[in-house]
Amino acid sequence: MTTTTTTTTIPHEIRCIEGHRIVQAELLKRAPGLYLYELPADIDRDGPCRWRLGHHSGSLLAAFRTPDAARRTAEAIGTWTDWALHIDTLRERLLGDHRHQDALDQLLRHIEKAGGHLENCAWYGPYGC
């Protein structure tokens, strides 16, 4: 018997330097509120990390070379917080007064372990990603 996994995609508005764009994004069941999408070809043109893990608000969380790396990260951080919250609520709850620095460090470790990083490749370190 073959099991098939259904992937649900929806139009999703992202924010980037080039402006707001609509992409097809995968809804991540293990991390409700986070979406997986591939960048349009004209954004971060030379960057090898075309796949993004983003918040439902359109904000970027992390960039990855493969969709599988982004999915692994989403599974690792899915229960870390309520990703369905409004982005301002998340920022205040998690970043206000650096209340949860240990948790933020753990989030970064999960992202980096999967091969991801926080910014577009053009802005990521002196050598790119």
Image: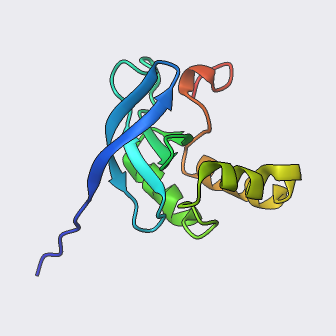
- Quarter of the view holding residue 101: bottom right
Judged left or right of residue 18, residue 41 is left
Residue found at x 32% / y 37%: 23
Q: Residue furthest left?
A: 1
Q: What color scheme is it? A: rainbow
- 29 relative to 128, above or below: below
- 41 relative to 114, above or below: above
Q: Residue furthest right?
A: 97
- In which quadrant is the C terminus drawn? top right
Residue 99 percent coordinates (x, y): 86, 58
Residue found at x 29% / y 50%: 10
Q: How many marks?
A: 0
- 96 relative to 77, above or below: above
- In which quadrant is the N terminus drawn? bottom left
Judged left or right of residue 80, residue 7 is left
Residue found at x 60% / y 32%: 119
- Quarter of the view holding residue 79: bottom right
Residue 57 percent coordinates (x, y): 51, 45
Question: In this orientation, which residue lies closer to the viewer: 7 or 89?
Answer: 89
- 62 relative to 114, above or below: above
Question: In this orientation, which residue lies closer to the viewer: 51 or 24?
Answer: 24
Residue 88 percent coordinates (x, y): 67, 49
**Residue 30 appears in the picture as rendered:** yes
**Residue 105 appears in the picture as rendered:** no
Residue 91 percent coordinates (x, y): 71, 50
